[in-house]
Amino acid sequence: MKWTLILIVLVSLLSCSDIEKKKDTHITTVTYIEDAPKLDGRPIENFWNTLEWYPIDQNWIGGPFEHTDFNGKYRIAWKEEGLYLLLEIVDDSIYKQAKDPLKLWWNDDSVLVYVDQDNSGGLHRFNSNAFTYHVALDGNVVDLAEDKEAHFFNDHIISAHKTEGNTTYWELLVKVYPDTYTTSSNVEPAVLKKGDKIGFALAYGDNDQSEKRENLIGSVFIPGEDKNQGWINANSFGTLILDK
């Protein structure tokens, strides 16, 4: 009986450690911008050129792919109302097949934005401890909610994209919501400020006209064999530090 109780305690402690973010990883310092860009998929604003490109190059799901099949990178900035993102995606085939945007949405080409407002890490599959937003080609934004169903989160992310040849530019405004958010609440997005730490990652779901998604390519390294952790556990996110 004594050893059974000890075992239960040990398992509980291990379980708690698995869902708490132990340290900041993949730290990115994010620059403040005075003027918001026009979200039109045309990155003509001068400030975009002053920001560093970060790669989207970690293969989380799928087999090897050629550079001509996919390569991606992004820039990021912030204002009080949210995070501004510019993505450059080179993809030889952009594919959308789902007729119902709330079913099998993950199998289409899409941008995935992972956000944890307080950088706390932990499980978030059916709660707002963190979010995994799927931004579809038609602009719909989908994630799972507390009722274990898929919902639109179109007011959380505003996006636009334009494609020329094999290159697509995406511009996004990502509003950052706290863990008190529910689909039935009136919780407002956080007002961002210098010094904030936000859990964050990006990914691109790539499908070259197959029945199922072929690759999920992310922005942060995830150790171990199962790298598709972000949609369940925010421990796998990187960390943004907002600066002026």
Image: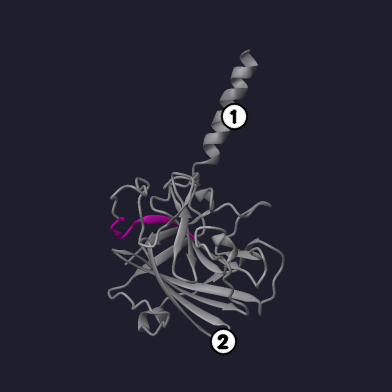
Residue 157: image location, x then y, percent: 39, 64
Residue underneath mark 2: 165
Q: Quadrant of residue 198?
A: bottom left
- Which element type, helix, strand or loop, lies under badge 1? helix
Among the 4 quarters of the image, the one containing residue 213: bottom right
Position of 32 relative to 7 (above/below): below
Residue type pointed to by label 1: Val
- Discs 2, 1 touching: Cβ within 8 Å: no
* Residue on which the image places disc 1: 11
Q: Is residue 233 visible?
A: yes
Secondary structure type for disc 2: loop
Q: Which residues are magenta?
A: 189-201
User: Residue 184 in magenta?
Assistant: no
Q: Earlier in the sequence, mark 2 or mark 1?
A: 1
> Which quarter of the rendering shows the N terminus?
top right
Q: In this view of the protein, which residue sits in the foreground, 166 or 57?
A: 166
Q: Real-space Cα distance between discs 2 and 1?
A: 53 Å
Residue 119 on image: x %, y %: 42, 51
Tell me which residue sits at (38%, 47%) in the image: 179
Q: Is residue 50 left or right of residue 125?
A: left
At x 50% / y 47%, what residue is drawn? 125
Residue 132 in view of the camera: no
Residue drawn at x 52%, y 41% is 19
Q: Is the C terminus in the top left, top right, bottom left or bottom right quadrant?
A: bottom left
Name the residue located 39 percent from the left edge and 66 percent from the top edge. Answer: 30
Relative image position of residue 103 (x, y in whole percent): 54, 58
The quadrant holding residue 105 is bottom right
Dot 1, how many residues are within 10 Å of its Cα: few (below 14), some (14-19), or many (20+)? few
